[in-house]
Amino acid sequence: MNKYFLSFIVLFFGFNAKSQLNLLVYGGLHSVDVKASDFIITNQSTLDSFQFALEKASYGYHFGIGLQLKFNHFYIQPELQFNSNKANFKVKDFSVPNTLDSIKSEKYQYIDLPVIIGFKAGLIRLYAGPVAHFFIHNSSELFDVGGYDDKFETATFGYQAGLGFDIGFIGIDIKHEGNFSKYGEHVTFFGKKLKFDKNASRLLGTISFKF
């Protein structure tokens, strides 16, 4: 028993002697990449119909903190991140002749929990890992459209992979994020959930400061 205990102590202190723990504070911008189909929505009670489509998924912003535990060339980095996104949807009402398309905006806020595992060589870092998104709030002009409702999942999941550069205590990162759920799955009209063609993905650019 004493032999195993002493071995554990040696390994523990040996690990901590070679490891390094840093606090990260970061922020940045991201773009959403999604190609969505048009939908024809029909109210079965009145037979009125309209066209609904994603017009544009705009740029968003994110900021957060992380802990980077580095051991030799490898590191693990759990993070706590806030992100905000905006999307514009196009609505065309077929019941009104010669009507113009109307643009309705939605904004979403999430708390993200990425867990990054990476490799660093010199100034360059390569990394990947899972990420969980927790929905916290949204505001939408789509409630002006009859029959609209939203049903957000409490949590969705995805992955991140990217490339980073460290210059002193400043880090610059570009990462790709993919998600396992379809974009716009929260959208429902007259109780029917819409599903767009593609899983949402993002390209994130981030500047971080290491302490």
Image (cartoon, helix red, strand yellow):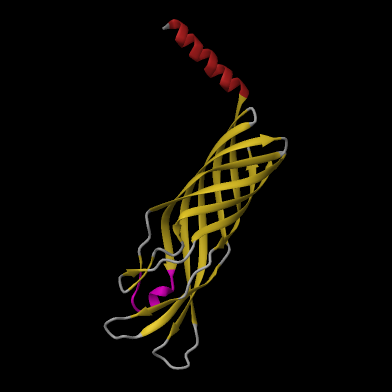
In the picture, measured across the screen, residue 95 lies left or right of residue 101, that is left
- Which sits in the foreground, 205 or 44? 44
- Which sits in the foreground, 182 or 93? 182
Q: Is residue 165 above or below residue 11?
A: below
User: Residue 107: x percent and y percent?
Assistant: 48, 65
User: Residue 19: x percent and y percent?
Assistant: 60, 26
Q: Which residue is painted at 72% across and 38% down in the image?
A: 123
Indicate yes or no whether the magenta region holds residue 141: yes
Q: Can residue 65 be seen in this snapshot?
A: yes
Q: Which residue is painted at 42% across and 55% down in the image?
A: 135
Hey, which residue is sitting farthest left in the picture?
Answer: 45
Q: Which residue is painted at 45% across and 66% down in the image?
A: 196
Hey, which residue is sitting farthest front in the picture?
Answer: 197
Total numbered badges shown on the rendered structure: 0
Residue 65, by quadrant, is top right
Q: Is residue 131 above or below residue 198?
A: above
Residue 56, by quadrant, is bottom right
Hey, which residue is sitting farthest bottom in the picture?
Answer: 97
In the picture, measured across the screen, residue 209 lies left or right of residue 86, that is right
Hey, which residue is sitting farthest top in the picture?
Answer: 2
Indicate yes or no whether the magenta region holds residue 204: no
User: Residue 141: x percent and y percent?
Assistant: 44, 74
Q: Is residue 120 above or below residue 99?
A: above
In the picture, measured across the screen, residue 80 lies left or right of residue 203, that is left
Q: Can residue 145 be seen in this snapshot?
A: no
Q: Quadrant of the C terminus?
A: top right
- Which sits in the foreground, 181 or 87? 181
Q: Which residues are drawn in magenta?
A: 140-149
Q: Quadrant of the N terminus?
A: top left
